[in-house]
Amino acid sequence: MSSSTIQPGHTQAFENAIEVHSQSPGTYAADLKWEWSVGSAPNGGYIAAILHRAATTHFQRTHPTAHHGRAVPIQMQLTYIRRSDIGPAVLSVKDVKLGSRVSVIHITMSQGGRDKVAGYITMSDPVSETGVSTTTGWTAQPSVPQWVPPDTLAKGADSEWRKVVLPNAEFRRAASQVEFYEPKNPSVGVGFVSHWARLRPSGPDGGIGRWTPESVAFLCDIFPITLGRLEHVVHRALSGESEPKAKPPPVWFPTLGLNLDLKKPVLGENVEWLYSHITIKSLRNGRMDVEVVVLDQAGEVVAISTQASLVMSAERNAGSKGHSSGRL
C-alpha cells in the first residue's frame, strides 16, 4: 500500500523513499534509497521513518477500524542489529497486543534473509490520546535565542541565525536533504548543539516540504552539526595532532538502538520549521549517547529520542552499494 497517489506534505521525494507495499498479511516490501544514506548504509532515522510507515500501513490494511481508523505510532523502540544496505528490504509485522487505548506490534526489517533492524512500536490515535496535560517547567538549555524560524528573520545583522554548510555532505547524504540554521554564536563543544531545520530534498520531486510524523522520525537521527564537531575531536584523538584540521575525514556513527517518543502530532499542521536540541553526555570507548528534543515554533515538545551509537572509521562503511557484510 502506498500514499503516493496523494500529494504528500513531506515532498514526493521523501514519500518515494519511505513507501511500503503489502506482500501478504503482516509482510511488506520497501526499497532503501541511496540519497537517504550515510556512505553506503541507510541512515538510522530514515529506516525508522520506513518502519513508522509500515506500522501505519499494517493497521490500515489489517485492523482498519482499530483506534478509530487513525492508528499511528506514539513510541518506537528499535535495535539496529546489523548494518543495512541500499536496496530491497522485507518488513515483517506481528501483533503483540491489540487494545482500546494502545496497541503494540513487533516489527523486523530483513535483507538477504538476515535480520537488520527489529523492535516494538506502540500505536494509538488522537481520539484515544486523552488525559491530563500540564507544563513541567522544563526548557531547552542552552536557551533558544528566538522562537522564530530563520527565514522570517531580517537578513541584516540583527539575525541571530546562519545557514549551516554541512560537513562531509558527500558522505552524509541523508542530512543533505534537510536545510539547517544554527545560532551565529553557538555553544562551544560537542555536548550541546541546537538548530532549526526544514525538510528540503533535492531532485525534481524535492523542494521545501512540511514535517509529518514519518519525517519527524527521520529528523530525530539527523544532527550534522554535532557530528561535524565530533569528527574534529575523533581525528585529533586518533592522529595525535594538537591543531584542528580544517576538514577532517568523515567518521561513521552507526546507530545501535533508538528510542523515539512522539509527543505532539504534526500531521496536517503545515509545519515547515522544527527546532532540535541535541545533547551528548558521554563518549567512552567508541560508544556515545545522543538525546534529541524536537520542538515546534511555539516551544512545545514534538518528539524526544535517545540513542546509542558507535564511533567508527568511514572505511567500515565503505561496502559496495547493496553488498555489505552487515557487520558493525
Image: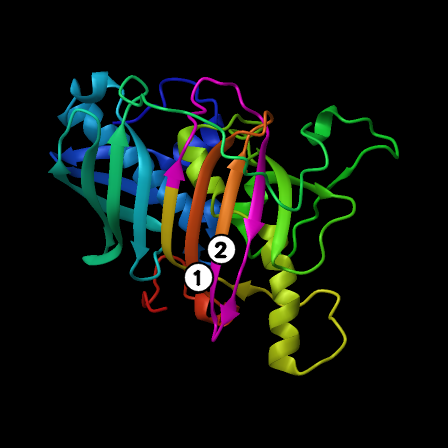
Residue beneath disc 2: 290
Q: Position of residue 138 (x, y in %)?
A: 54, 38
Determine which of the numbered discs, if any, sits on residue 41 in the image: none
- Picture residue at 20% right of the left edge, 31% below the top: 58
Is there CB contact under 8 Å for labels 1 and 2?
yes
Reply yes or no: does residue 270 show up in magenta: yes
Residue beneath disc 1: 309
Q: Is residue 134 visible?
A: yes
> Which region of the structure is painted magenta?
261-290
Q: Position of residue 164 (x, y in %)?
A: 70, 45
- Picture residue at 62% right of the left edge, 53% below the top: 192
Label 1 SS: strand
Going from N to C along the chain, the mark reached first, 1 or 2, is 2
Q: Quadrant of the N terminus?
A: top left
Tell me: 72 left or right of 252: left
Chosen colour scheme: rainbow
Seen from this angle, which residue lies furthest bottom? 240
Crowdedness near tag 2: few (<14), some (14–19) or many (≥20) residues, C-alpha within 10 Å: many
* Mark closer to the observer (1, 2): 2
Count the marks. 2
- Picture residue at 63% right of the left edge, 50% below the top: 193
Q: Spatial distance from mark 1 to mark 2, Cα to Cα?
A: 8 Å
Q: Is 312 rendered above or below residue 255? A: below
- Say which amino acid is labelled 2: Val
